[in-house]
Amino acid sequence: MGLFDIEKNAAAMGQFDAAAEIDNIVAWIRKWFENNGPKADAVIGISGGKDSTIVAALLCKALGKERVVGVLMPNGEQKDIADSKKVVETLGIRHYIVNINPAVEGEYAALRDAGVDIGRDAVINTPPRIRMTTLYAIAQSLPNGGRVTNTCNRSEDWVGYSTKYGDAAGDFSPCSDYLVCEMLQIGDALGLPSDLIHKTPSDGLSGMSDEDKLGFTYAVLDHYVLTGEIEDQATKEKIDRLHRLNLHKLQTIPMYKRK
């Protein structure tokens, strides 16, 4: 099954009322801001993919577009930067474009100068961590303060498809309990452009699609997470292993309790 079979997969797994879930999420966001920043703006990184597009739209419904600040953060040249610009234009939100490439290359240079042989994972994960630093810098520079939005979904979190202290960070997370198949339905119910919601997901870092990099489709993953059913044993073992190895990303930092 491919990405566009996910909606069919979701229907087979049971009824999902996207409109009702939108109302629930919007109410939750409003309540969270009442308690954690009544006048603060919501700051969100805009990648041009489905998750940041959907979450940004939900923020607009909850807070009003005047309290949503989008941040586009290309690392040098971003091939799909037009999609990111389309998101902020469609929603009519304030936005900043911050090219993080000088910061990324500066970090690499500092590490090399210190004698560090930079590993492949460090090369992949440093840009999203610098992006999160950028979001917090902007949030703390706004007149009324800002709260940084986490845009992760449950499917990606399940297998750890995020960067710890990068896109896995944030002050609040409106959609981390929703699978990819459910996010697609929410995006469609919000009336967002189909080419943004249904574009092939990619991390923009490795040059591969999410599904190619993971080695299985989100449709298979979602079905397994919800039902425990999966046809291929090797895929089951891979998903279970990824879930086990990446649980630390979802937990608070372990702290020793003195005796």
Image (cartoon, rainbow, N blue to C red):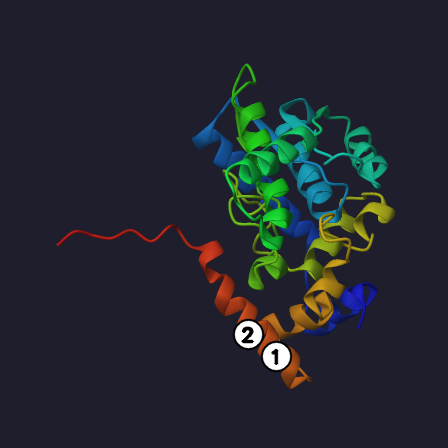
Q: Is residue 203 left or right of residue 31?
A: right
- Nearest the viewer among 19 and 184 is 184
Residue that appears at 70% across and 50% down: 19
Q: Nearer the viewer, residue 186 or 219?
A: 219
Q: Relative to 221, does residue 124 appear above or below in the rendering? A: above
SS of the residue at dot 2?
helix
Residue 125, percent from left and from top: 60, 47
147 left or right of 5 in image? left
Numbered tag placed on residue 61 in the rendering = none
Residue 41 position by quadrant: top right
**Residue at numbered disc 1:** 236
Residue located 56% across and 63% down the image: 158
- The residue shown at (63%, 24%) is 67
Q: Which residue was labeled with disc 2?
A: 240
The quadrant of the rendering that contains the N terminus is bottom right
Question: Does any portion of residue 92 appear in the rendered image?
Answer: yes
